């Protein structure tokens, strides 16, 4: 940015500190001050917003186009507080959505998307045009997606049964129904560990041989239960019955996952950072944060040095004529040979 301290390296450093090391801008302000540089948090926030809009958004849009052509997408969402959002009180929740590629053998793409609510319309809009397997939790908003095969998350289902296990029980007593439900899930995850190194085709065959009978036994056992609806076990059973149409779809393709842990693991760094910087001041700031988190997490997944990749984008994007030559962005993708050579770990 002309006539300012905002060089590619300084902006990349501010982004790296906030979105990788979870250091809020007010703490960075003190850190710069200790080096004899007067750099306010407001100025750094403007750097992040301006550079995201000018240089990162085009990269994100290109990555999104690539993501929508994949066969498998995982989704998750987490709350966010935005103080100055039109028509909303500062205390109300906005949401950071995450959509990422699955274990399809291609370079991973992980994208964050800030939205003002948790309405399923946001996922429907962002993933418009996607045709394939959609892995998610039990949130009903994802039902708005059309033309996809929805795959449920066995980790979420297992968690419901774990939460229903009594804190205290008689020694050597028979397993409770909650423990039986958990054990069914554990057997599936154990088999998945054993099949992890197989090719998708072989994993598909082994799942049908080893896991399908367990699924059939689980659903038969589940139908025999009549727990109180408001009890913890009742909630676990209700969740499982409601999700039954989606829970076996991972068997349809060896590339599908048994859980949505891929997305949950990628949204965790955002949740950790949020504990430190607490909120976004404006919607522009929240959107910029989504863009930087997208670059950061995609860089990590592609084994890049995050700071080097941020610096690389901010260094070369100003001279990239992506409007007339969209294919020029391919050279800046995290999986390109040049980027891997310069920014790879």
Image: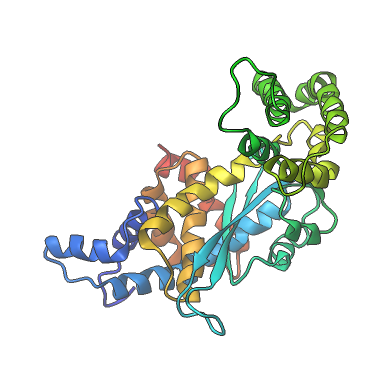
What residue lies at 58% left-to-right and 45% top-to-bottom?
A: 264
Quarter of the image containing the C terminus? top left
Percent position of residue 8, x then y: 34, 61
How many numbered callouts?
A: 0
342 shown above or below 274: above
Q: Which residue lies furthest to the top in this view?
A: 172
Q: In this view, does 230 lie to the left or right of 64?
A: right
Percent position of residue 329, x then y: 56, 58
Quarter of the image containing the N terminus? bottom left
Percent position of residue 151, x then y: 77, 43
- Which residue is at the front of the view, 294 or 286? 286
Give the quadrant of residue 27.
bottom left
Q: Can residue 200 be seen in this view?
A: yes
- Which residue is at the front of the view, 180 or 240? 180
Give the quadrant of residue 145.
bottom right
Q: Residue furthest bottom?
A: 87
What residue lies at 15% left-to-right and 65% top-to-bottom?
A: 33
What residue lies at 66% left-to-right and 18% top-to-bottom?
A: 173
Q: Is residue 24 left or right of residue 33?
A: right
Q: Can residue 320 be seen in this view?
A: no
Percent position of residue 291, x then y: 50, 62
Colouring convention used in this rendered image of the protein: rainbow
Q: Which residue lies furthest to the front in this view?
A: 170
Q: In this view, does 217 lie to the left or right of 166?
A: right
338 shown above or below 171: below
29 shown above or below 208: below
Give the quadrant of residue 10.
bottom left
């Amino acid at each position: 940015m002309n006539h300012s301290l905002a060089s590619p390296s300084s902006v990349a450093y501010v982004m790296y500190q906030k979105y990788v090391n979870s250091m809020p801008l007010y703490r960075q302000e003190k850190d710069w001050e200790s080096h004899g540089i007067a750099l306010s948090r407001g100025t750094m926030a403007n750097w992040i917003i301006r550079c995201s809009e000018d240089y990162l958004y085009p990269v994100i849009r290109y990555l999104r186009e690539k993501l929508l052509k994949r066969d498998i997408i995982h989704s998750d969402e987490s709350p966010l507080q935005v103080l100055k959002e039109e028509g909303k009180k500062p205390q109300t929740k906005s949401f950071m959505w995450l959509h990422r590629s699955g274990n399809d053998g291609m370079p991973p793409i992980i994208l964050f998307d800030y939205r003002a609510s948790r309405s399923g319309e946001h996922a429907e809009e962002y993933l418009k045009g996607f045709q394939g397997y959609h892995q998610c939790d039990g949130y009903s908003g994802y039902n708005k997606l059309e033309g996809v095969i929805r795959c449920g998350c066995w980790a979420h289902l297992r968690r419901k049964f774990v939460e229903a296990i009594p804190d205290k029980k008689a020694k050597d007593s028979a397993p409770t129904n909650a423990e039986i439900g958990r054990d069914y899930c554990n057997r599936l995850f154990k088999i998945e560990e054993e099949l992890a190194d197989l090719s998708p085709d072989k994993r598909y065959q082994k799942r049908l041989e080893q896991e399908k009978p367990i699924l059939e036994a689980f659903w038969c056992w589940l139908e025999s239960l009549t727990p109180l609806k408001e009890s913890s076990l009742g909630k676990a059973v209700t969740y499982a019955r409601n999700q039954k149409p989606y829970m076996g779809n991972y068997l349809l393709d060896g590339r599908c996952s048994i859980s949505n842990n891929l997305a949950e693991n990628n949204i965790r760094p955002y949740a950790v950072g949020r504990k430190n910087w607490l909120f976004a001041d404006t919607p522009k700031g929240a959107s910029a944060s989504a863009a930087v988190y997208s670059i950061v997490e995609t860089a990590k997944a592609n084994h890049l040095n995050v700071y080097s990749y941020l610096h690389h984008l901010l260094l070369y994007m100003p001279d990239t004529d992506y409007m007339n030559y969209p294919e020029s962005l391919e050279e800046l993708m995290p999986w390109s040979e040049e980027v891997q050579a310069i920014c790879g770990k």
